[in-house]
Structure formats: C-alpha cells, structure tokens
Image (cartoon, rainbow, N blue to C red):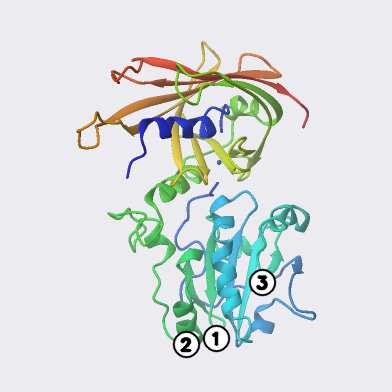
Amino acid sequence: MKPSFCSRLMGFGFLCFSGFALAFTSSIAVGAGPEIGDQAPEIELEGLAQAPAGSVATMEALRGKVVVIEFWATWCVPCIAAFPHLNELVEHYEDSNDIVFIAITNESQETAAKVLDKNPLQTWHGFDTDGSIWKSYGVNAIPRTIIIGKDGRVAADTYPTRVSVEVLDQIRDGKEADLPSMGEMMGEDEDGGERDGGGSFGMPGSIAEMNQMQMQGTAPGADHKRLDALAGSWTVTESASPAGPMGPKLESESPVTREWIQGGRVLLETRRLAGADGVIQHTYIGFNAEEDAYYMCEISALEVAPVIWDGQWDEEKSTLEFTRSMEVQMMGMPGDDGGTSQEIELYLAFDLSEKDSYRTSMSIDFGSMGMGMPGGRQVMSESTAVRSGD
C-alpha cells in the first residue's frame, strides 16, 4: 500500500531535510573466498570476548562442532538489524555443545562496544582489526554468514536472516544445507553474470544494487577532494517545512559527523534523527569513476528499502547535487477509488564554495500536482553547517 502524499512528505522531514540525512556495505565478488565444500581457512583472532572461560576459536579447537561465523561492522545497519534473529538462534541452541556462533568484526573491541552495549548480540565476539580473516574468507559484503560443518569444511555462505533452525539442523546432521548462495541472492548466475530477478531469495534488489554501487566503480582520487569538504564534524542549523512548501518552518540544530570507510572510497554519515524516537540513519556517498558520477545511499528504520540518489558536480557553482524520483499517492476526492499516483523529483544540493562551512538545500519538483498544491520546483529546507572540529 502506498502512503498518502502528506505522510510521505512528513517522512521527508525526517529523512531528507537534515541536509543529508543512513548502511550496508560493499558488493560481493563470488568465488573470492572458499567455496562450499572447501576446507575452511584458519581463524586467528586478535581478541575474543563473551565466550566461556578457556574457549579457543581456532579451526582445530572447533573441529567436530558446527561454527556459524557472522561478519559485521558497527556502521552496517542491516548487520545490526539481523542481531535479534541471530540471538533467537543462539538461544535455541544454548543447551547444545556442538554449535558455536562467532560474530567477527574488523573493528576494535572499544569501537564494537559502543554498538553492542545498546544492541546486545549473544554470540562469541571476535576481533580481526587487520582484516586477515575477512580477506581469507573473501568477505567484501556484510552482513555475511559463513557456516562451517563438523568436518571443518564450508557448508553455507549466505545472509544471516536466511539461516534457520532447520538449516542448522541439516548441517549438524551432515546434510547439504537448503540455502541459496550469496551470489544467487545478489542476482548473479553460476558464472557470475547478472541473473533475472536479482535480489530474490529474501534479499531486496535495492540492497543488492546498493552493494554493487558501493564497491564496484568506486575509486579514491582527485574527485574525492570534493567529498573531503564534507568529511569531519559539523554543527548543522536547519530550517525545514516537512508538511510541504506552504507549511510552517521548523528550526533545528544537530551535530553531524562523516568519516571515510572502505579504504577511503565511501564517505559515511551516521545521524540520530531528531523527532524520530532516536532512529539512527546512515548515508553513504561515493564516486563512480567509470560514469564520472556520484551516488548517495540512505538507510534507516523509517524506510522499507535503501534510498539511492544519483549525483553530479557543478564546477561553475561548486555544488554537488543529488537527485532521485519518487512516486506518491494523491488523496482522492470523496467517492473516488483511492486517488491517483504521481512521480515527483527530489533534489539535494551541497554548496561547497566555502572552506570551513557549507550550505544545503532540499527541493522537490511537484510537477502539476493540482489539489491546491503548488507546481514546479519548491525549496523544502535549507541549512548551514559550520565545522566543529574533527
């Protein structure tokens, strides 16, 4: 069911008007790590927490057990969204001594604790800050779950919410897991080519698309100097009209921090949305070198799927402008059968002409909306940001 026009605009008040108001990760290269049936690479953790006293997380020590390895990071919203599902699995097998769950991050224990304190995960916690385990397992997309059978061989390579009690029981009994591969879920065929229905098997196509955008076609370089202007810590003062261009202006001030991730290829913003019950939203921006274009991806609990924007640099105005289309449902007149839908265009522009400050404007092209709504492109919010220190 499509939301009404007003409800969608109210959503923009939270999602877009904050100047940038999102997380997932990279694309997966199928075959980069061990394949199903291969001997699992060794695990050499730099730290292990929340495990029983005397526990050792090595392939030799864990042989004879089913090992569920969850690769995750603190900035990955879908990773954290999968925690409750993983906790249910851990609780189901809490009296079993032949299944072990290990969540491995490439961040430090101190960094992970900031998220885990608020979002408990009942697995063992492993720390791989040099990324050696991620590399040996071919992990370039998270969340990612790799299950190792009792014989020490890879039994499954999948997405965490695809793992079930039935699947784990199959693997524990030495049977083949009834699971699609990550490549299948990412919309690739057996040869790595694109397959119709990409994103099926429970992984939304938009997430698969965002994964592809975040790693493939991105590269650090001179063009990222433009994005460097947005990196760091800022104090953002904003004036927005979430109820529409004719509505009242709402004033707010919020801290914004952006940092480079994925080897300096993707700029990540993490923001707590004011007025949205503490919802965390992350935004990624990167540069597609092949297409000479920028992109921006947003995720939050207020959206049912990632939001992807296309961006271009205007050299003359020193402005980075992102655009996306959106379909809204118009409220019908009494007696109508639900009204009509219309596509509108959204624009988010960053004026980077100044060194230690920037301006943002959010506008919507309503086209010929009718129903008393103004047509054409209308400014919905404007903000100024001042660097507050890194």
At a point 42% along the width and 34% down the height, the residue shown is 7
Whole-percent x, y for residue 130 in the image: 71, 57
Whole-percent x, y for residue 211 in the image: 47, 48
Q: Secondary structure at mark 2?
A: loop
Q: Earlier in the sequence, mark 3 or mark 1?
A: 3
> Residue 276, can we see it?
yes
Residue identified by numbered label 2: 174
Whole-percent x, y for residue 322 in the image: 47, 26
Residue identified by numbered label 3: 43
At a point 50% along the width and 43% down the height, the residue shown is 302
Quick one: label 2, few (<14), some, or many (20+) residues within 10 Å?
Answer: some
Q: Describe residue 77's horizontal placement relative to residue 176 as left or right.
A: right
Quick one: label 1, few (<14), some, or many (20+) residues within 10 Å?
Answer: some
At a point 41% along the width and 81% down the height, the residue shown is 176
| Tag 1 near tag 2, CB within 8 Å | yes
The front one of 161 and 338 is: 338
Three-letter code, disc 2: Gly
At a point 56% along the width and 33% down the height, the residue shown is 21
Residue identified by numbered label 1: 151
> Residue 291, can we see it?
no
Which of discs 1 and 2 lies nearer the camera? The answer is 2
Disc 3 versus disc 1: distance between alpha carbons? Answer: 15 Å
